């Protein structure tokens, strides 16, 4: 397939020259669309949990069963990251270099890897579904709900891989609006289909799973339609799908950071659910499901802020505009601290209304309020983790970013989740206390290291003149 010759985009203009304009405006200009896109993506799980919690006769068991499926869905996203986050940037680099043939081959090789991995994950889930769910924390009461949801969700794993993984290549070609529409189309479909299938067709939790699969299918079809259509710069092509080992290894190497960060999230969910099942039973697994859902929403703005700051920092760092890099770090840190402090106050004051959004079970609400307040007790330190990690990534220190993600989740959270409930004075609350302790230790360590090794060592004079 012939492609139009392209050349490196070496020129600057007012829209992409981050050495010009107010730093605050530049960061917010990038952060707002990123946050909106992430918010739309999260609507899948949030809408499912709100409707599932209201299934007649299921009490909190259906919500808990849905929560048990989360580690599996997160693991699927991790593998989508491996090839999407790995191949997307490589495609962009080759596009900038003018090597259109290799850019297209990277995209097509990633597509094949996503399909193969999706098929393997589907077969593994089908084969080990029951022991997997019990290992995650299912009980005899919640297993039927978790099994019902996962049995249908697994049929759409390949669709998730295509929709989520290949959307990176739409962004890589410069079609950000198309990428957002891809996610939005599935989210809107899910919002419409959930009540119809759960309540209208009386399918219960299976209806929630089917609505999700159909919605992901709609998004996947949109992705494939675009990447085989006239507007795409690089199209899916059978000749370019021939796998090359060295190319696939490059894709996986670059995508490994996104993979490991998503996979540790899944591991933390497994440990939390199994520990809660041991010390508190189904009720507290349901409590964690609500808290995890609120966390996904509440941390979105600070996550979007730091993600939006990364290209601004990186661009100015490459242009040797070090004063603007330092200002970007200060602005991001300040806004992050203000937001997380305000979010902590709101969550503490609105703990009961938050739980009532997801459940009417008085026992779950009563048990959940103190757990939520403990969980968010040191949320302000989360901004230090986000600011530190995003700075490491923006300035090319990905290994530091991966290390501090592993430090907080794998090295601190998981051991504390297992150990703290054994302390008599803490009991079940120890599981929820692991989060604020890890925020304090991990966030402080990450930000302090960034400050000492990067911020303080940045030259105070710009070298771009």
Image: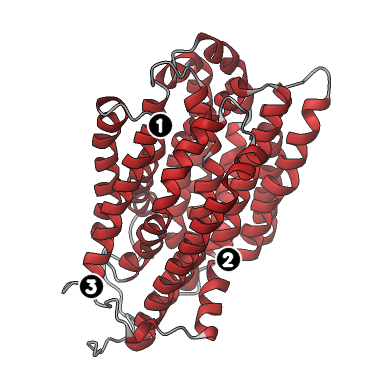
Could one spot residue 226 in this view of the protein? Answer: yes
Residue that badge 2 annotates: 256
Q: Which residue is found at the position 54% from the left and 19% from the top?
A: 348
Label 3 – label 2 distance at C-alpha: 27 Å
Q: Nearer the viewer, residue 421 or 399?
A: 421
Q: Quadrant of the C terminus?
A: bottom left
Q: Residue furthest front?
A: 127
Q: Quadrant of the N terminus?
A: bottom left
Residue that badge 1 annotates: 205
| Placement of 359 over or under 119, stated as above or below | above
Q: Nearer the viewer, residue 225 or 131?
A: 131
Q: The residue tagged with tag 2: helix, strand or loop?
A: helix
Q: Residue 368's x, y, as percent?
A: 57, 18
Which marked residue is nearer to the observer: mark 3 or mark 2? 3
Label 1 – label 2 distance at C-alpha: 33 Å
Badge 3 vs badge 2, beta-carbon distance below 8 Å: no
Could one spot residue 313 in this view of the protein? Answer: no
Q: Which residue is found at the position 29% from the left and 81% from the top?
A: 237
Label 1 – label 3 distance at C-alpha: 35 Å
Q: Nearer the viewer, residue 313 or 465?
A: 313
| Placement of 464 over or under 381, stated as above or below | below
Q: Point out the tag, 1 or 2, that comes first from the N-terminus.
A: 1
Q: Is residue 450 left or right of residue 50?
A: right
Q: Point out the tag, 3 or 2, that comes first from the N-terminus.
A: 3
Q: The residue tagged with tag 1: helix, strand or loop?
A: helix
Badge 1 vs badge 2, beta-carbon distance below 8 Å: no
Instruction: Give the number of the disc on residue 228.
Output: 3
Q: The residue tagged with tag 3: helix, strand or loop?
A: loop
Neighbor class of circle 3 (other Cα within 10 Å; few <14, some 14-19, many 20+) is: some
Q: Quadrant of residue 242?
A: bottom left
């Amino acid at each position: 397939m012939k492609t139009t010759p392209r050349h490196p985009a070496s020129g600057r203009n007012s829209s992409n020259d981050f050495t010009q304009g107010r730093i605050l405006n530049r960061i917010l200009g990038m952060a707002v669309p990123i946050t909106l896109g992430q918010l739309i993506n999260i609507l899948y799980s949030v809408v499912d949990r709100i409707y599932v919690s209201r299934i007649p006769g299921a009490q909190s068991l259906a919500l808990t069963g849905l929560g048990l499926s989360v580690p599996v869905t997160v693991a699927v996203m991790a593998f989508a990251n491996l090839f999407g986050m790995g191949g997307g940037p490589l495609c962009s680099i080759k596009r900038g270099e003018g090597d259109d043939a290799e850019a297209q081959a990277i995209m097509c090789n990633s597509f094949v890897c996503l399909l193969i991995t999706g098929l393997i994950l589907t077969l593994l889930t089908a084969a080990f579904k029951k022991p997997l769910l019990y290992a995650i924390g299912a009980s005899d009461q919640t297993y039927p709900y978790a099994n019902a949801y996962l049995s249908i969700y697994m049929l759409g794993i390949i669709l998730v891989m295509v929709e989520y993984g290949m959307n990176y290549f739409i962004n890589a070609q410069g079609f950000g609006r198309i990428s957002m529409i891809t996610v939005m189309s599935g989210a809107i479909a899910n919002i419409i289909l959930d009540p119809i299938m759960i309540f209208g067709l009386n399918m219960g939790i299976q209806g929630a799973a089917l609505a999700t699969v159909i919605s992901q299918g709609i998004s996947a079809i949109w992705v494939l339609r675009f990447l085989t259509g006239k507007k795409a710069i690089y199209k899916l092509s059978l000749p370019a799908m021939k796998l090359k080992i060295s190319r696939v290894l490059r894709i996986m190497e670059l995508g490994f950071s996104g993979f490991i960060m998503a996979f540790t999230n899944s591991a933390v969910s497994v440990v939390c659910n199994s520990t809660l099942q041991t010390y508190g039973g189904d009720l507290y697994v349901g409590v964690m499901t609500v808290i995890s859902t609120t966390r996904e929403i509440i941390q979105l703005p600070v996550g979007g802020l730091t993600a939006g700051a990364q290209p601004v920092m990186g661009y100015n760092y490459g242009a040797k505009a070090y004063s603007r890099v330092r200002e970007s770090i200060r602005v991001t840190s300040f806004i992050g601290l203000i937001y997380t402090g305000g979010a902590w106050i709101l969550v503490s004051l609105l703990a009961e209304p938050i739980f009532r959004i997801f459940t009417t079970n008085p026992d779950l609400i009563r048990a959940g309020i103190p757990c939520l307040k403990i969980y968010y007790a040191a949320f302000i330190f989360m901004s230090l983790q986000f600011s530190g990690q995003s700075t490491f990534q923006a300035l090319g220190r990905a290994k530091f970013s991966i290390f501090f993600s592993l430090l907080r989740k794998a090295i601190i959270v998981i051991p504390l989740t297992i150990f703290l409930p054994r302390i008599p004075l803490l009991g079940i609350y120890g599981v929820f206390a692991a989060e604020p302790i890890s925020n304090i230790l991990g966030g402080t360590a990450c930000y302090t290291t960034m400050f000492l090794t990067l911020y303080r060592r940045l030259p105070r004079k710009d070298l771009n003149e």
